[in-house]
Image (cartoon, rainbow, N blue to C red):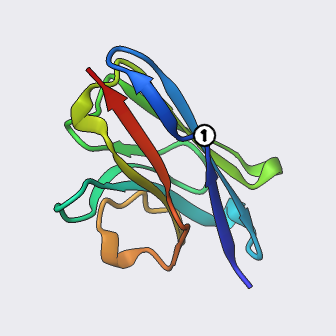
Amino acid sequence: QVQLVESGGGLVQAGGSLRLSCTASGLTASTYAMGWFRQAPGKEREFVAAIGWLGRSTNYADSVKGRFTISRDSAKNTVYLQMNSLTPEDTAVYYCAARKGNSATAQLSLYDYWGQGTQVTVSF
């Protein structure tokens, strides 16, 4: 059974930083591309960042470029999202996702497995 478990969310002031982690079990993470998505109240789930299975290719939403960094540690079956210079607009539930293959796609429908999400709240 595949499980993706996110951690690291919380409450932070604007301008602060958080690092999210997603640990996968039941799959060999090194053969899966991994992504982060987020969903704010009343909005659709949107792409944040993705990384290929080798960790060499990354993809970011324009809204987070230069502020967020995705990385992975395949030995630990874990992917990270370092979030800096957070703003209240970053407030959302953040979800980790996995898809077979190397493409760090932004397309939500192409991801096979999803975590339960972790709440990130950025205050003024």
- Of all residues, the one furthest to the right in this rendering is 75
- Judging by the rendered image, the residue that carries numbered circle 1 is 8
Q: Quadrant of residue 44?
A: bottom left
Q: Residue at x 44, y 62 (%)?
A: 103
Q: Residue at x 27, y 25 (%)?
A: 87
Quadrant showing the C terminus: top left
Residue 79: percent from left, percent from top: 62, 47
Q: Is residue 121 above or below residue 77?
A: above
Q: Is residue 30 above or below residue 20?
A: below
Residue kind at label 1, given as amino acid type: Gly
Q: Is residue 3 left or right of residue 47?
A: right
Quadrant showing the N terminus: bottom right
Q: Is residue 6 above or below residue 62?
A: below
Q: Is residue 112 above or below residue 5?
A: below
Near mark 1 (Cα within 10 A), the count class, few <14, some 14-19 or many ≥20, is some
Q: Is residue 60 left or right of residue 54?
A: left
In this view of the protein, which residue sits in the foreground, 19 or 40? 40
Residue 20: percent from left, percent from top: 56, 40
Q: Quadrant of residue 21?
A: top right
Residue 22: percent from left, percent from top: 63, 52
Of helix, strand and loop, which one carries label 1?
loop
Q: Residue at x 26, y 43 (%)?
A: 61
